């Protein structure tokens, strides 16, 4: 970790450890995560920053977090969920999708919104890149978590030919597990990118058909957008990884 980044992040991490309440530490960690990621992505804005300026940035980030939580509470109340009961309505299960869903046959859903790993696209889900280059394991240090997995664990396969075969085989297994927990005509909404959209997008669709889905009649054509801030190596004319596609299917 560069000295200037360590001088900002380490004292902040130490101050978080003095917070007594668990929720307070979690909220402060979320703020440090967001601010730390901004510093890593745009180091020129933070290299000469004073501790006081860093603290003001953290306060702004915390205010943004609180405003977002308040908006969530108000929207939940509009749908009949008191803010005091929001936490019990939200469930997070950490594990492989097919394993989690296999244990919960009582779950049924009419909507799934997801963004699976992008086949063949270089995305570091488990690292931050300093100015888009040097890799840092900083998020795991901030969260006090161990990282024992390589890139292919997070991307469902490497970028080589064998890795792509693993990717689509895993995608089929996961999507079949999701399909078993969907109600009739439930919608599956996905945002995904491809290193070669001409071939991979068709194969992606074939896997979904094999898993029991069909293109949604209203959204029969995929929409796409150019990803803002995409890394320089993904914006080559021969590389379609700078585009994200919105795909909508139904059970």
Image (spheres, rainbow, N blue to C red):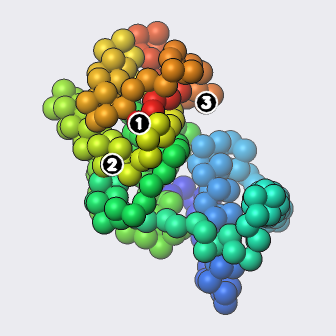
Vertical arrangement, residue 163 with respect to residue 147, above or below: above
* For residue 163, side relative to residue 139 (left or right): left
Circle nearer the N terminus (3, 2): 2
Question: Residue drawn 42% across and 47% down?
Answer: 182
- The x and y percentages for residue 115 are 47, 40
Disc 1 and disc 3 in contact, CB within 8 angstroms: no
- The x and y percentages for residue 158 are 26, 37
Label 1 residue SS: loop
Mark 1 or mark 3, whichever is nearer to me: 1
Q: Quadrant of residue 103?
A: bottom left
Residue at the extreme front: 184
Label 2 residue SS: loop
The residue indicated by pointer 3 is: 229
- The C terminus is located in which quarter? top left
Circle nearer the N terminus (2, 1): 2
Q: Quadrant of residue 36?
A: bottom right
Circle nearer the N terminus (1, 3): 3
- The x and y percentages for residue 216 are 49, 25
- The x and y percentages for residue 156 are 29, 43
Query: Label 3 vs label 2: CA separation?
Result: 37 Å
Label 3 residue SS: loop
**Relative depth, front residue between 82 and 25:** 82
Vertical arrangement, residue 162 with respect to residue 155, above or below: above
Question: Residue drawn 47% across and 36% down?
Answer: 185
Q: Which mark is residue 251?
A: 1
Disc 3 and disc 2 in contact, CB within 8 angstroms: no
The residue indicated by pointer 2 is: 180
Mark 3 or mark 2, whichever is nearer to me: 2
């Amino acid at each position: 970790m560069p000295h200037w980044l360590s001088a900002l992040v380490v004292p902040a991490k130490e101050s978080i450890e003095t917070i007594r309440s668990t929720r307070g530490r979690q909220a402060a960690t979320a703020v440090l995560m967001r601010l730390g990621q901004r510093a890593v992505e745009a180091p020129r804005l933070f290299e000469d920053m004073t501790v006081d300026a860093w603290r003001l940035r953290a306060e702004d980030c915390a205010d943004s977090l609180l405003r977002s939580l308040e908006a969530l509470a108000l929207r939940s109340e509009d749908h009949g969920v008191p803010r005091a009961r929001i936490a019990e309505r939200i469930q997070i299960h950490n594990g492989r999708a097919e394993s989690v869903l296999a244990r919960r046959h009582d779950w049924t859903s009419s909507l799934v919104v997801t963004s699976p790993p992008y086949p063949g696209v270089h995305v570091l889900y488990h690292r931050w890149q300093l100015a888009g280059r040097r890799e840092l394991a900083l998020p795991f240090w901030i969260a006090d978590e161990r990282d024992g997995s390589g890139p292919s664990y997070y991307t469902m396969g490497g970028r080589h030919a064998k890795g792509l075969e693993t990717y689509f085989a895993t995608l089929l297994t996961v999507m079949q597990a999701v399909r078993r927990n969907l109600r009739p005509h439930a919608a599956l909404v996905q945002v995904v990118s491809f290193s070669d959209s001409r071939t991979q997008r068709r194969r992606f669709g074939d896997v979904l058909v094999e898993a029991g889905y069909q293109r949604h009649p209203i959204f029969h054509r995929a929409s796409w957008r150019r990803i803002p801030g995409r890394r320089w190596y993904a914006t080559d004319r021969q590389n379609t990884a700078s585009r994200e596609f919105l795909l909508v299917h139904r059970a």
